[in-house]
Image (cartoon, rainbow, N blue to C red):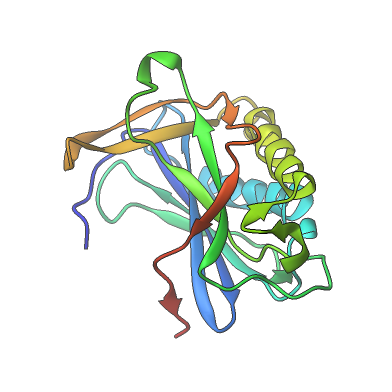
Amino acid sequence: MAPFVPFYGGVQVELLFVLDGKVVENRLWFWQPDYPHSSVDLLSLADGVYTWYTTYILPHLSDQLQLASVVATDWSAPGGLFEISTGPVVNGGVNAESSSANVSIVVGFRWPSQYSRLKRNKNYVPGVPEQEITLNTPTAFIQDILFEGYAALVDYARTIPPVFYWYWVVTSAILGNAPRDEMHFGKTIGPLPRPAIILGQRRKRLPVV
């Protein structure tokens, strides 16, 4: 297990999916300096991200992909408080074969230009319908859907109760191939646009238990 890198005032939000009998995940990070965050704050964030994903992203993914839960964890210290979204398990909205569980579309995130050379987090979107990939390249349609969906999160995060509390941020936990002492972060200014939204390989999947 990788060493814990604290993020003071930060919250990790995990989106947990089931695809072809495997659990896959994506992580997003949010920040607000008034910490520790309460259970009410964390639950509101988990529910807010659930609503965002099921509104902007999931309807355009294969119905073979299932969003199982969204978990928000205070990352200020190891073993932080966490809350799980109250939304039901829901499948993607496209009645089509999904790409393999190890095939994803990579959505990179942008942050302030002075940090541009630092390694930073991104999402590997699973459950992409097979018809949205042509010769190992995502179609313009799915690239635009993912760009617009993630771009919407920049402002949407500010509307999650308590309103004007949360910021979606980009994080960096590694420096020089070693864990940082503390997470480096910057406010997100959106996803990378086309053609930087590309096909990628998801290398790690978790068994369903």
| Quarter of image, res 117 | top left
Q: Looking at the rendering, in which quadrant would you find the N terminus?
A: bottom left
Figure check: 7 above or below 126: above
At which x and y percent is residue 16? 54, 65
Camera-nearest residue between 138 and 71 = 138
At which x and y percent is residue 11? 43, 43
Question: Furthest residue to the front?
Answer: 135
On the rendered structure, is 133 left or right of 16? right
Camera-nearest residue between 97 and 168 = 97
Question: Furthest residue to the top?
Answer: 114
At which x and y percent is residue 52? 70, 46
Residue at image point 80% right, 73% down: 96
Residue at image point 65% right, 66% down: 127
Figure check: 58 above or below 149: below
Q: Looking at the rendering, in which quadrant would you find the C terminus?
A: bottom left
Residue at image point 45% right, 17% down: 112
Residue at image point 70% right, 44% down: 143
Q: How many marks?
A: 0
At which x and y percent is residue 193? 64, 32
